[in-house]
Image (cartoon, rainbow, N blue to C red):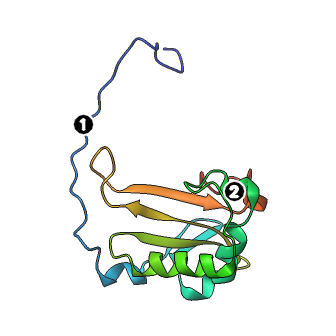
Amino acid sequence: MAPFPDATEKKWVTIRSTLPPIPYGDSHSNIALETPRLVLRPLAETDLEALYVLQTQPEVVKWRSTERPDASIDVTRGDLLKRLANQESIDFAICVKQTNDVIGVGGTHRRKGNLGFPVIGYTFRFEAWGKGYATE
């Protein structure tokens, strides 16, 4: 068999799952995930400066829905406070395990997407691109 199926061949997959409760609840504030090189921990107010750097890098923001850098750290602060107050999303700081440097953010940002499940997304600082972090 070829490594990729013929483009005309259609395969269907059925997924049976349930959505998480609304709102997610306070239990998500204690979640931390680890990979071999990364720690994903709940986003916190102390991540403001790292988030500001991320949200002002031209290479990064062209992939955001706004497509423009934050005009000031106050704009980033407002975005961060909205993220922290939203009980229908979970946002993580993506940190390098060895240094604890925040190199990105990710999580669920839309409760119900086009397929009925939460939409996940992530953004990494430009310097972290091409190092396999997103795959990890």
Mark 1, residue position:
14
- Confirm whether residue 96 shows in the render: no
Residue 130 is tagged as: none
Q: Quarter-wise, where is residue 96 in the image?
A: bottom right
Give amino acid for label 2: Val
Circle 1 residues within 10 Å: few <14, some 14–19, many ≥20: few
> 27 or 33: which is nearer to us?
27
> 106 or 62: which is nearer to us?
62
- Left or right position of 12 against 101: left
Q: Quarter-wise, where is residue 126 in the image?
A: bottom right
Q: Position of residue 76 (x, y in %)?
A: 61, 76
Q: Secondary structure at mark 2?
A: helix
8 lies above or below 19: above
Gap between marks 2 and 1 measured at Cα: 34 Å
Residue at figure coordinates x 48%, y 14% from the top left: 1
* Quadrant assignment for the C terminus: bottom right
Give amino acid for label 1: Thr
Q: Earlier in the sequence, mark 2 or mark 1?
A: 1
69 lies above or below 51: above
89 lies above or below 28: above
- Confirm whether residue 118 shows in the render: yes
Residue at figure coordinates x 23%, y 59% from the top left: 19
Mark 2, residue position:
60
Q: Position of residue 66 (x, y in %)?
A: 58, 57
Q: Position of residue 71 (x, y in %)?
A: 69, 71
Seen from this angle, which residue lies furthest right?
127
* Foreground tag (2 vs 1): 2
- Left or right position of 88 against 94: left
- Left or right position of 113 against 122: left
Seen from this angle, which residue lies furthest bottom?
46
> 55 or 34: which is nearer to us?
55
